[in-house]
Amino acid sequence: MKLFFRIVIFCCFININTNAQIVLDSSIAVKDFTVDMLGQCYAIRGSEIIKLDATRNIISTYSKKDLGNPSTLDARDPLRLLVFYRDFGMIRILDNQLAEQSQLDLRQLGFTDVRLIAGNDDQSIWIYDRSNAQLSKLDVRLQKSLLTVNIRQFLGKAIFPRKLEVSRSWIVLQNDKELILLDQYGTYARTIPLNYSPTLFQLDGHQLLTGNGDTVEITDLNLFDSTKKIDMMLPFEAQKAVLFKDKIWYLKDDKLFLPKD
């Protein structure tokens, strides 16, 4: 993934032609998607997970309807896909061929209203429980560790985070038009205000990429006041965007748009 951000810097002065896209042919709306570090795309289509390779061919599918439709996907580890079923507090772990490996019941671990999850490349998982505004870490054995942070306590206000990104160095919560930063130990670092609610929200190590429409920014989280604008445009009114190398995937009107070659 470090190569990814070097490529992003190289492309700082390139305007991506977002009209040069194809739409995933589907009669069922796509709810969420993600792209792993190998450029493979995973999408939620109804109760089904589909995997597309770099040439946009569907190469694997997974469907299990007992928990309804998945809520979100996480593919930070390209060999381990996390499929989150928010209404049931369940995470299913699939391999890179979409074969189910295990299942994690968050309610059995004492969590009552998990809203967000984020996997890390050390095989830990961070989760945000809305019921007590706590951010907690599950260790490599998928057991609840002692590392739990009460977000409301140190911020002194209620928050309603929409997205969560983690790396081995940083934890970032996107709360409307602000980013809440914590270090790898859950210690609050600072809050970065934004002028927009990001549709592009990606973290690699200490590099954070955010954007919406004609505003795309890269921030070095190890440095204060290090946010720089990139001369790049994202699709307006997109629900979500993901950048990989010089190509962009995005979700708009519940349709998944994939880059052309």
Image: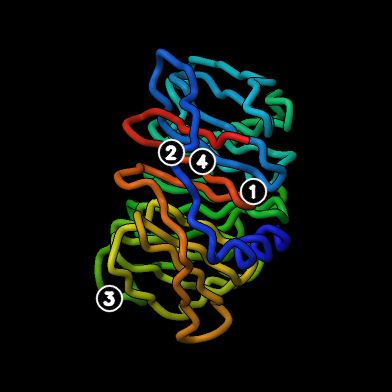
Position of 143 relative to 6 (above/below): above
**Which residue was labeled with disc 3?**
156
Q: Where is residue 248 drawn, in percent x and y? A: 53, 45
**Which residue was labeled with disc 1?**
76
State which quadrant residue 74 falls in.
top right
**Which residue was labeled with disc 4?**
249
Q: Is residue 131 left or right of residue 250?
A: left
Point out the residue furthest to the left here: 157
Of mark 1 and mark 3, the one earlier in the sequence is 1
> What separation in Å lies between label 3 and label 4 (alpha carbons)?
37 Å
Residue type for callout 4: Trp
Of the 4 image quadrants, the one containing the N terminus is: bottom right
**Which residue was labeled with disc 2?**
19
Of the 4 image quadrants, the one containing the C terminus is: top right
Of mark 4 and mark 1, the one earlier in the sequence is 1
Q: Are marks 4 and 2 in contact (CB under 8 Å)?
A: no
> What separation in Å lies between label 4 and label 2 (alpha carbons)?
12 Å
